[in-house]
Image (spheres, rainbow, N blue to C red):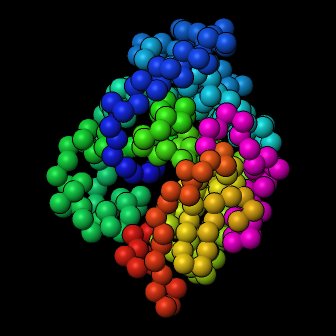
């Protein structure tokens, strides 16, 4: 779960053009969700990602639905056992239209904002809670907070999946990030030993201050999801005065423990063909983390 404010007006024209160019070629892959699924009528579009439904309202461009489908298939290609477990659990992916917000999705309409002791909050969010989150309604919080969420029902946003310039998260693929959370949840069931090794890797990374000032230092779950993005060459760069991590080779050199664990899940594939931000120049549009003489990040909200 990542944070940034969003202005949908900037992306409408670009999405219309992209949808017109690309969606018609595979229109036969998108249909109305089968009634047997029991989905809310909000969902007018459906595509199958080898047993995992990809859904969206009538406002979501077909090209975004199909790209989300292909991303999910690619991420699960090396481990069909994970795909089977997710299908068994009822995993789904929803795509928001540019004009839709997180709480427009039926499953998320009644979400409550996190309490001040919620472990997902960063240090800075806890510090500033009274004057920020504490002042918001539940809907205001979630609609400002997210254009994608992980979990059994994973969500992403059309403008990010399609790579529309000047939109939130441009330069990194948030669906890759959020769906990796779902993969991790499945691994808790089918490969708990891998999760134990991941927890050990995270502890070592924090001890060694490998990710000072980075979002991936915040929790075990974000360590995994941010690492997944680096694995697939689709994350904003981690930059300090002496280090840059922006691709899979950098990740292998900087955090070999995490890299080895990711390899067990994703195999040798570092390129999701449907990911518009693969090796994208905008990944370098990232704030530099300032470290003090001891190697600690200044004004650190995460580690």
Seen from the viewer's position, the closer of residues 287 and 274 is 287
Does the stretch in magenta take in 287?
no
Image coordinates for residue 69, horizontal then vertical, percent: 64, 27
Location of residue 99 in the rendering, given as x and y in whole percent from the top left corner: 35, 26
Q: Would residue 263 be counted in the magenta stretch?
A: yes
The quadrant in which residue 203 appears is bottom right
Q: Nearer the viewer, residue 276 or 48?
A: 276
Instruction: Name which residue lies at 44% across and 69% down.
Output: 302
Q: Nearer the viewer, residue 102 or 60?
A: 60
Farthest-out residue, bottom: 293
On screen, residue 95 above or below 263: above
- Count of number-bearing discs: 0
In this rendering, is residue 268 above or below 19? below
Residue 38 visible at all:
no
Residue 182 percent location from the top left of the image = 59, 43
Residue 281 x/y as whole percent:
60, 51
Q: Is residue 214 above or below residue 145?
A: below
Q: Is residue 123 left or right of residue 132?
A: right
Q: Is residue 206 left or right of residue 84?
A: left
Q: Which portion, as a residue range, is magenta?
A: 251-277
Of all residues, the one furthest to the right in this rendering is 268
Residue 41 in view: yes
Q: Residue at x 61, y 43 (%)?
A: 277
Q: What residue do we see at 75% from left, 48% from top?
A: 270
Q: Is residue 103 left or right of residue 89?
A: left
- Out of 105 and 242, give the one closest to the viewer: 242
Give the residue drawn at x 50%, y 20%. 17
Q: Judge left or right: residue 262 versus residue 129.
A: right
């Amino acid at each position: 779960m990542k944070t940034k404010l969003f202005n949908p007006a900037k992306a409408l024209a670009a999405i219309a053009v992209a949808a017109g160019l690309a969606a018609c070629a595979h229109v036969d892959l998108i249909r109305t969700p089968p009634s047997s699924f029991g989905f809310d009528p909000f969902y007018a579009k459906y595509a199958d990602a080898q047993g995992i439904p990809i859904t969206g309202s009538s406002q979501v461009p077909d090209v975004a639905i199909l790209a989300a489908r292909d991303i999910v298939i690619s991420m699960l290609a090396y481990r069909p056992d994970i795909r089977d477990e997710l299908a068994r659990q009822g995993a789904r992916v929803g795509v928001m239209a540019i004009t839709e917000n997180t709480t427009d999705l039926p499953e998320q309409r009644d979400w409550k904002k996190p309490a001040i002791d919620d472990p997902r909050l960063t240090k800075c969010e806890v510090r500033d809670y009274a004057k920020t989150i504490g002042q918001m309604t539940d809907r205001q919080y979630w609609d400002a907070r997210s254009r994608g969420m992980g979990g059994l029902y994973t969500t992403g946003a059309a403008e990010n999946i399609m790579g529309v310039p000047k939109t939130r998260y441009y330069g990194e693929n948030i669906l890759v990030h959020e769906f990796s959370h779902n993969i991790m949840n499945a691994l808790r069931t089918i490969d708990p030993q891998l999760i134990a090794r991941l927890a050990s890797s995270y502890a070592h990374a924090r001890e060694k201050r490998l990710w000072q000032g980075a979002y991936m230092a915040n929790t075990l779950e974000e360590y995994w999801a941010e690492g997944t993005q680096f694995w697939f060459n689709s994350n904003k760069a981690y930059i300090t005065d002496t280090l840059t991590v922006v691709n899979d080779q950098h990740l292998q050199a900087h955090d070999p423990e995490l890299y080895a664990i990711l390899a067990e899940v994703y195999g040798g594939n570092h390129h999701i063909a449907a990911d518009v931000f693969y090796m994208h120049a905008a990944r370098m549009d990232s704030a530099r983390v300032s470290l003090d003489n001891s190697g600690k990040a200044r004004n650190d909200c995460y580690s």
